[in-house]
């Protein structure tokens, strides 16, 4: 059954009106109309099965048939912190890690970050990324979309984790003794994880030292040289496999 996002589902209401992009997608792209059933979701995890009652220029009116249980969240809350990269790879990164179940995406810029977002473009890009995360949540049948935060500087990123209890990893191509596999296999699963992935040019040694001081553990993904977006997908998938919900939950 197709899934659509609305701003809020009123638990006491028996009808819902959908307008804007979701309504247009429903009626113009998918050619849905009266009598068609679908699932409505909101950003708080509420979801209902509904049937289209009417559709017109002002939107789509649906009758709520029943409340549905939201999917269970992963046992680990992952915040992925990727350096800003070019538009198309960044879009793909946000889409795929959202499908893989990260809770939050915190972009940042460090000294070797090539892409910089001027203030005049920042709001538009963040809105675009949030829309990608919403669509990925529908695709992956997530309870809620990944939260996408405004980009920050590297220093601010590190400070933000100062008082938060969490496992903290930083992917660094210069790490020669500790790899991600050893950390995941040799450490009890964490409930919260911050995973930092740098730009194509990597981190400076000064940045790595600052990250260590902030409690981040530098880890390697091995000898292969990965693009930034590939590294972000790899660490997300591996963490979800070892500590998260990339399983049927039967073992």
Image: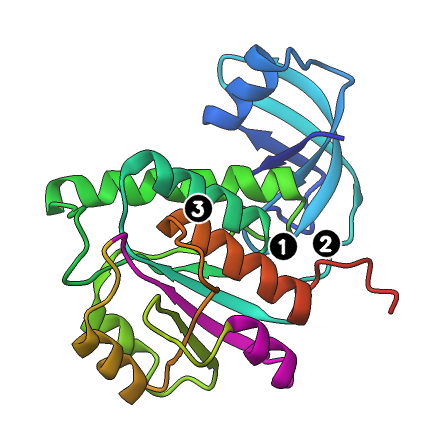
The answer to which image quadrant residue 215 occupies is bottom left
Judged left or right of residue 30, residue 229 is: left
Nearer the observer: mark 3 or 2; the answer is: 3
The answer to which image quadrant residue 157 occupies is bottom left
Tag of residue 94: 3
Q: Is residue 7 visible?
A: no
Mark 3 or mark 1: whose residue is earlier in sequence: 1
Report the residue at 59% width, 22% height from top. Answer: 60
Q: Decide: few, some or many residues near mark 1? Use Cα within 10 Å; few <14, some 14-19, many ≥20.
A: some
Does the magenta-highlighted stretch encompass residue 222? no
Q: Is residue 227 visible?
A: yes
Mark 1 or mark 2: whose residue is earlier in sequence: 1
Tag of residue 45: 1
Circle 1: element type: loop
Q: Which residue is mark 2?
A: 70
Residue 46: horizontal and vertical position, in percent?
A: 66, 52
Report the residue at 53% width, 27% height from top. Answer: 22
Rendered view: 113 above or below 170: above
Rendered view: 149 above or below 155: above
Rendered view: 177 above or below 201: below
Q: Which residues are magenta?
A: 180-200
Residue 222: horizontal and vertical position, in percent?
A: 48, 64
Q: Is disc 1 in contact with disc 2, using a CB cutoff of under 8 Å?
A: yes
Report the residue at 73% width, 43% height from top. Answer: 48
C-alpha gap between disc 1 and disc 2: 6 Å
- Which is more toward the observer, 113 or 125? 113
């Amino acid at each position: 059954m197709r899934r659509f996002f609305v701003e809020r589902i009123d638990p006491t209401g028996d009808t819902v009106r959908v307008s804007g992009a979701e309504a247009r997608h429903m009626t113009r792209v998918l050619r849905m109309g009266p009598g068609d059933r679908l699932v409505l979701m909101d950003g708080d995890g509420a979801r209902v099965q509904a049937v289209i009652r009417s559709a017109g220029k002002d939107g789509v009116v649906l009758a709520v048939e029943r409340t549905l249980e939201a999917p269970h969240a992963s046992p680990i809350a992952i915040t992925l912190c990727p350096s800003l990269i070019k538009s198309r790879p960044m879009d793909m990164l946000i889409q795929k890690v959202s499908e893989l179940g990260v809770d939050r995406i915190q972009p940042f810029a460090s000294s070797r970050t090539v892409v910089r977002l001027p203030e005049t473009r920042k709001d538009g890009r963040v809105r675009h990324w949030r829309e990608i995360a919403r669509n990925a949540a529908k695709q992956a049948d997530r309870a809620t979309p990944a939260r996408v935060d405004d980009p920050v500087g590297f220093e601010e990123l590190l400070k933000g984790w100062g008082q938060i209890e969490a496992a903290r990893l930083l992917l660094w191509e210069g790490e020669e003794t500790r790899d991600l596999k050893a950390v995941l296999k040799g450490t009890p699963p964490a409930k919260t994880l911050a995973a930092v992935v740098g730009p194509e040019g990597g981190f400076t040694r000064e940045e790595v030292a600052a990250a260590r001081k902030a409690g981040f553990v530098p880890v390697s993904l091995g000898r292969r040289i990965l693009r930034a977006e590939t590294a972000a997908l790899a660490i997300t998938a591996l963490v979800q496999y070892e500590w998260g919900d990339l399983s049927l939950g039967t073992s």
